[in-house]
Image: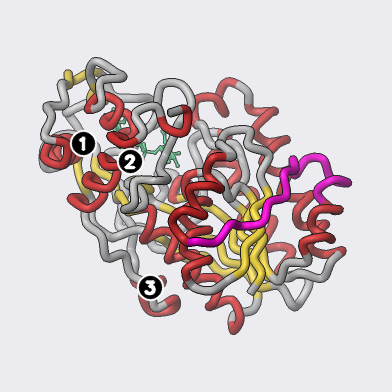
Amino acid sequence: MHVLVTGGAGFIGSHTVVSLLERGHRVTIADDFDNSSPKVLDRIEAITGIRPELAEVDLLDEAAFDAAFAAAKPDAVIHFAGLKAVGESAADPLRYYAHNLGSTFSLLRAMKRHDVSTLVFSSSATVYGDVQQPPYTEDGGRLDATNPYGMTKVMLERILRDIAGAESGWHIALLRYFNPIGAHESGLIGEDPSGIPNNLAPYILQVAVGRLPRLSVFGDDYPTADGTGERDYIHVVDLAEGHVAALEKLATTEGARAWNLGTGTPTSVLQMIAAFEEASGRPIPYSVGPRRAGDLPQSWADTGRAEAELGWKATRDIADMARDGWRWQEQNPRGFSD
Ligand code: UD1
């Protein structure tokens, strides 16, 4: 299958491109490198021996994107492109809503014009808000989000369901990611956040490599086993393989359907620190600070639907995630700027 991957140079996108190529699919990356590096293409080629095709285009430039789409003639789309920083979205909601919704509208119109009806959409466990108690099940309650970034995912899931409900022939996967971390085991691609990382694993890695002095643990008075927040961290290569499984499942699934991509296992902040200390052989200095506004005590997936319907299950554990994340960081201390 020829797959157009929007945001294919990003963290999850690049790992998914590798999995698609290894599985024998043809890939065109559509990316404007707004928050990613063109070096990713060289690295993907080094890993797989295949250079993905590239459409360097901004989805919001609808005419240019449509022309790129028409030239590529894909059979299916995996849509990663979008803005994703929670704090930034709270400070500038208009930019987030306009960008994430507008670029998806541009994509959907191109798909309709060129008769492409298979779409895998990057959603997030953030759509569960604080409505359910974990483990979260796909149909366990209404969707909600505590910030504009998350709300773009809630809205886009609804928009995609409405479209698939109104018109027959769509095949849409809504993939709700838990907390993707780690890196490809080659150490050639990984997460390269711009500025100070907001998320736990990249922050810990930058402390381990000496770019940041210490970690602040956001609260140790949660009602959890050790008092720190618990999350369902998933190895990005498992996540990438989940996309390939979902894409292949869509051949026989009409309409729009949501699947959780997680491991089903919670890990605390202190357990994460210990795992990365072990993997890196370096101490991770930390101090306990106040809770971060909007954080939940706990979040993890019910993985039953993905296992039963996609035939997919995460196989890598926290030690694997810490080892592969550290290998990437140690080999590329400044990410793709090295
Ligand atoms: C965050 C986003 C979520 C997004 C997800 C992407 C918020 C409120 N939520 O989720 O919308 O989909 O990233 O992966 O930003 N922690 C620390 N110190 C740090 C950073 C994090 O103690 O410097 C703790 C947090 O309190 C939390 C855990 O580590 O308990 C994980 O945090 P993070 O990696 O930011 O992920 P989420 O909060 O789950």
Q: Nearer the viewer, residue 159 or 95?
A: 95
Q: Regarding mark 1 in the picture, which secondary structure is present there?
A: helix
| C-alpha separation, residue under disc 3 versus residue under disc 1 | 27 Å
Q: Nearer the viewer, residue 18 or 89?
A: 18
Residue 269 tag number? 1
For the residue marked with disc 3, what is the amino acid? Answer: Trp
Nearer the camera: disc 2 or disc 1: 2
In the picture, the quarter occupied by the C terminus is top left
Q: Regarding mark 3 in the picture, which secondary structure is present there?
A: loop
Q: Residues within 10 Å of mark 3 (few under 14, many from 20)?
A: many
Residue 215 vs 261, above or below: the answer is above
Q: Regarding mark 2 in the picture, which secondary structure is present there?
A: helix
For the residue marked with disc 1, what is the amino acid? Answer: Val
Q: Please tell me which of labels 3 and 2 falls first in the chain.
A: 3
Q: Residues within 10 Å of mark 2 (few under 14, many from 20)?
A: many
Q: Please tell me which of labels 2 and 1 falls first in the chain.
A: 1
- Disc 3 and disc 2 in contact, CB within 8 angstroms: no
Question: Could you tell me residue 23's position as x and y percent?
Answer: 49, 72
Q: For the point 82% across and 57% down, which residue is it? A: 109
Which residues are drawn in magenta? 49-65
As drawn, the residue found furthest toward the top would be: 213
> To which residue does mark 3 refer?
312
Specify the color scheme: secondary structure
> To which residue does mark 2 refer?
328
Question: Quarter-wise, where is residue 151 in the image?
Answer: top right
Magenta segment includes 50: yes
Q: Please tell me which of labels 3 and 1 falls first in the chain.
A: 1
Number of labels in the image equals 3
Q: Is residue 259 visible?
A: yes
